[in-house]
Image (cartoon, rainbow, N blue to C red):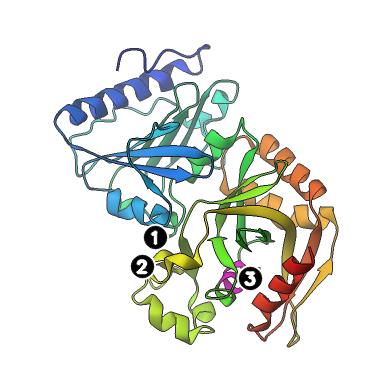
Amino acid sequence: MNGLIRASEGEAAAPVTAFLGRALAQFESAAGKSHLVCFTYRLGPWNIELRHLGPGLEDLISPAFAHLPLLTGERADLIVYCCDVESTDFDPGRMPWRRDDIGPQGDIGHLAATDLRASWDPEGRTVQILDRARAVGLFLIESRRHLRSWERSFPLRHILHWWAGPASGQLMHAGALGTPDGGVLLLGAGGAGKSTTTLSCFGSALRIAGDDFVLVDSGPPATVYSLYGATKLAGTTLARFPALAARLGHPHGSVEEKSLFFLDRIDRNALIESFPLKALLALEFVDDCDTEIVPTSAAAALQACAPNTMFLLPGDRELAFRKIARLTRSLPCYRLKLGRDLSQIPRRIVDFLDRH
């Protein structure tokens, strides 16, 4: 434990560094009593180890990563410590920031010039911290009861977003479909048709890298990496896929929320870990039977994905925007005009990829 956490330069980071040090000391003490449950996953180019203090969060966080390789004996690039305070003896102490330090998305803005990143969600009663220099993350929540079902579909996304910051990768609010030879990124805000398009291709030659968030390395070569194996569906969307709905079984989530499903529990082979990225498709529903793919501008593709991505990811927004803009300038951009006949969607995308 000695040397794992050192005071970062600058007064702004010192309280957060001290808070993180105290937290990790409690985790290390629990490890000596065999109270840590550990899993190491291959997420994109990294080995990420999750260390759970007790069983309180493991069954809520791990399912989203269950489609990815589970590693044994591999060195972790990043270790994330996870704990719900209510079910353990964990004592977080006082939060190491003031109310004025918290930005509109919960990010602690005065850390921007340091190796530390942090966020506080008062509604979800959740703290997330990353120390890039030490390759250590912390996810604390007051109680598992406060982990909302939609957060289960993309857990730890703040920490993964911050971790990707200095590298060429970028978490993007997008869907992704493809094969080992190449695929496409599906761009659009909530309700644009990402889940509809993804599920239309379920069981086809196209495999799913993600329905909501994926990691995109702008390269070259540009590559998509799967992070999460979950999908969230409104009842109206699910009703359009009756055969799949029967296989999905009981959803997670309240009646007010979208239902949450884990696709690897239906068909693990329908998912893919990564593929070369060939093009960007901005989604648009049209009042027509047929689906078609037509060229569009890099500016239109940027507008379809940058604002909603940055809204859902706290901090480092200028860097994220530059990465996304670079991606839209470097790849062909098209508009996927979604017609009412869902069976056409996978055929159109497969034909498109065969020509590119």
Q: Quadrant of the N terminus?
A: top left
Q: CA distance from mark 1 to mark 2?
A: 7 Å
Say if 83 sits above or below 209 in the image. Answer: above
Asked if residue 237 is among those painted magenta in the image, a careful observer would answer no
Q: CA distance from mark 3 to mark 2?
A: 21 Å
Q: Where does the magenta region start and end?
A: 193-198
At 80% from the left edge and 58% from the top edge, which residue is drawn? 333
Residue 217 on image: x %, y %: 65, 43
At 61% from the left edge and 67% from the top edge, which residue is drawn? 194
Crowding at mark 2 (Cα within 10 Å: few <14, some 14-19, many 20+): some
Residue 355 on image: x %, y %: 79, 67
N-terminal-most mark, 1 or 2 = 1
Residue 271 versus residue 109: which sits nearer the camera? 271
Q: Secondary structure at mark 1?
A: helix
Which residue is labeled 2 in the image? 252
For the residues labelled 1 and 2, say whether their Cβ atoms are less than 8 Å apart.
Answer: yes
Which residue is labeled 3 in the image? 193
Amino acid under disc 1 = Ser
Amino acid under disc 2 = His
For the residues labelled 3 and 2, say whether their Cβ atoms are less than 8 Å apart.
Answer: no
Q: Main secondary structure of the magenta part?
A: helix
Which residue is labeled 1 in the image? 149
Residue 353 lies left or right of residue 39; in this view the side is right
As drawn, the residue found furthest toward the left would be 33
